[in-house]
Image (spheres, rainbow, N blue to C red):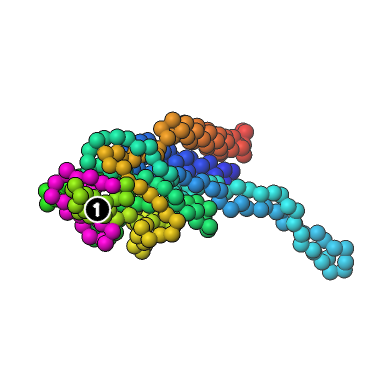
Amino acid sequence: MFRGFYTAGSGMIAQQRRTELLSNNMANANTPGFKADQSSIRSFPEMYLSNLDATKVPVKNSFQMKGFDPIGALSTGTYMQETMPLFTQGQLRETQLTTDIALVDGTLPVNPDTGKPGAVFYTLEGTDGERAYTKSGNFALNPEGYLTNSAGNYVLDQNGQRIQLPNDDFQVTEDGIIQYGELEAAAIGISYAANPDLLVKRDNGLFYAQQDLPNAAGAQGVSYSFKQGFIEQSNVDASRTMTDMMTAYRAFEANQKVLQAYDRSMEKAVSEIGRVNG
């Protein structure tokens, strides 16, 4: 009986966490470059129950031979094991701003270990000096003329240096070269992650790696392009997310009703079973 409380309770916790994840996805449906999180819900290891007994052997010393009768498996509940971002390309939206630069995926080799393609990212300098990575190309020039993202992180060039520009009247080629007329000012740095699932997702659409990612320009079989005056939108599917939220809510309610049923059974057992009538 008590095992049922834990099983239903773990299901409620898992669905609550899934609802929170989906709510965060919905809240960022209009955030440029946002990558929707996906959850993985799994069950705890099952317990295999058996009935232990002892059979007396008809001998002089009444020898007892132990045995067991299989009862079956017992589930011990579920839990949300992990969350992983979905790195598919979001739709492009035209803004006509010169500082908005969309990074368009081209050919991305499939990782043989995961069966998923790699991913390319803008290379940024985080507030703590670490390398940070993002898919959001919603940039601007700060008062010192440095190209930064919406959170103030510096955009880096192919040599890992900050990009400083005289003004925002520039052009960006499909290869990521920033030009003023015929003069080349900088080349936007792009990094390549062969297994993006290993990246750690943080605030402001930033990803971090344990080791600096290699330059995508030198990665074999990797291609990408740039589109100035466009930004990559979030890859959140709003309609599907709403459907998943309703499914999670109904699963939470179902577990809640099971928990209430167990509670009524326990109340009845305590108040009625074993009552001595006078």
Q: In the rendering, at what x and y percent does residue 206 appear?
A: 31, 50
23 to the left or right of 67: left
227 to the left or right of 98: right
The amino acid type of the residue labelled 1 equals Val
Q: In the rendering, at what x and y percent does residue 267 appear?
A: 54, 36
Mark 1 — residue? 155
Quarter of the image with the C terminus is: top right
Nearest to the observer: residue 193 or residue 35 = 193
Residue found at x 26% / y 62%: 159
Q: In the rendering, at what x and y percent does residue 197 appear?
A: 44, 53
Residue 126 in view, yes or no: no
Q: Residue furthest bottom?
A: 61
Residue found at x 46% / y 45%: 39
Q: Which residues are magenta?
A: 149-173
Specify the principal SS of the magenta part.
loop
Element class at badge 1: strand
